[in-house]
Amino acid sequence: MTDSILAPKPNSPMAKAGQAPKIGLVSLGCPKALVDSERIMTTLRGQGYSFSRDYAGADIVLVNTCGFLDSAKAESLQAIGEALNENGRVIVTGCLGVEEDLIRATHPRVLAVSGPHQYEAVVNAVNEHLPPVPNKFVDLVPEQGLRLTPRHYAYLKISEGCNNRCSFCIIPQIRGDLASRPVASVLYEAERLVQAGVKELLVISQDTSAYGVDIKYATSKYRGRDVKAKFHDLADELGNLGVWTRLHYVYPYPHVDSVIPLMAEGKILPYLDIPFQHASPSVLKAMRRPANQEKTLDRILRWREICPDLTIRSNFIVGFPGETEEDFEMLLDWIEEAEIDRAGCFEYEPVTGAPANELEGIVPDDVKRDRFERLMEVAQNVSTGQLAKKVGRTIDVLVDDVEPENNRAIARSKWDAPDIDGQVIVSNATGIKPGDLVTVTVTDSDEYDLFATPVVKAS
Ligand code: SF4
């Protein structure tokens, strides 16, 4: 989960005469929620609003909430409380917005509540409680919209909702069934981002490999050509834009095979983020996970034959109801055999409203903790081994940050997604800036990171 706070509180309830009204935005939750925040910001900026980086400078505060897990709900309610205390004028939107009664019972003073993707409702609420001030000198919205990520990478949301019904998840209840965007709209947005200086596109959705299923892979006109709203075709077109394209939230359906050659030829990054969650057939069945899991290991081995550079990142849940020690050991063996390069792990936590709450075989907390630690140890060993194989190679890295005092840059390779994976620590980094693409030689590795020195600098 990502928390980004762009702007949180106002002293004055209304904008001062003639000045652009200022909004504070607290954005909680996953990258998909972040994209929603960006869209809301873009629309509001177009209406002449500006944004404040602190509560004191804002006329109203918008809290984009997360409602995925009970802990995320608690965090969202706490953020709303903080905004009310610090500011007093708060509008709530996002996933927790579907539980308006809960929000109003906890915080009766909130001005308005709307659910996820209800852009119009949020903007209407802002207009009602903080009317825009007409101003012909208002800044134009940058063509690529407003973003919360650094200038050199951007999330590209290709669909909303999900057709799967995993038993531990309430996302489909909150966000509805899969609703894919027309492919031309996605591609034109990607183009605008690239023109604005983005060097890495991170494709996100709840189920990226299901893209287009709901709209029967409808074609739309992109640059005069008919393009199908299909997972492979979208990846292929994005690969033509000349920037890094990284695929997140992919399931191992057979048709995913078709993008592996695009990775092998360097069109898109050799990276797949596949939330497997488990490997034991009985646990996967209880989880009601999509895709044929029995053949998954064979599929991964075939992918690696075609694209040896492929990195697989995944998430796993330990302590799911009914998970036995045998199931868990099967998972550990599977992670080793599949050589899952990057693994995250959650201890199972019931989510209010999820069908898994009815399952028997609750795993005690101390067993969950023990399994979490054992899984992370195995994952760390696999990661260490995989990264050690990269030492000596010359690779391109994208610089996220620089530390002039240490003369080093913090960068990422094609194998590292921002925030969730490791980094490449580049020494002798004089003259290197965030957003630069730099060619480096990998000199060392540890459990999660690579260490490198520059070969050639290019922007
Ligand atoms: S694939 Fe499963 S876990 Fe992911 S959003 Fe859909 S229902 Fe939830």
Image (tube, rainbow, N blue to C red):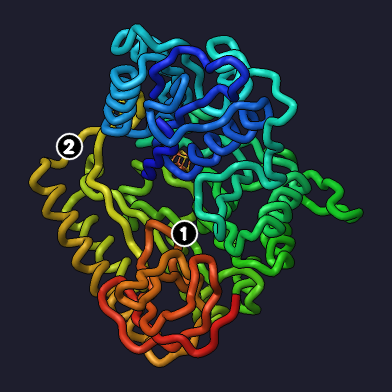
User: Circle 1 is placed at which residue position?
Assistant: 273
Give the CA distance from mark 2 to mark 1. 28 Å
Instruction: Nearest to the eye among marks 2 and 1: give it.
Output: 1
Specify the farthest residue to the bottom. 392
- Name the amino acid, label 1: Asp
Would residue 66 be visible to someone looking at this image? no
- Asked if marks 2 and 1 touch (Cβ < 8 Å), the reply is no
User: Circle 2 is placed at which residue position?
Assistant: 362
Task: Give the side of residue 215 with respect to residue 298, left or right.
Answer: right
Residue 251 in the image: state x and y as whole percent: 51, 54
Height in image: 284 above or below 349? below
Judge the density around disc 2: few (<14), some (14-19), many (≥20) Cα neighbours within 10 Å. some
**Residue situated in front as seen by the camera: 206 or 67:** 67
State the mark number for residue 431.
Answer: none
Quadrant hosting residue 63: top left
Residue 307 in the image: state x and y as whole percent: 55, 78
Would residue 399 be visible to someone looking at this image? yes
Residue at 34% in and 58% down: 279
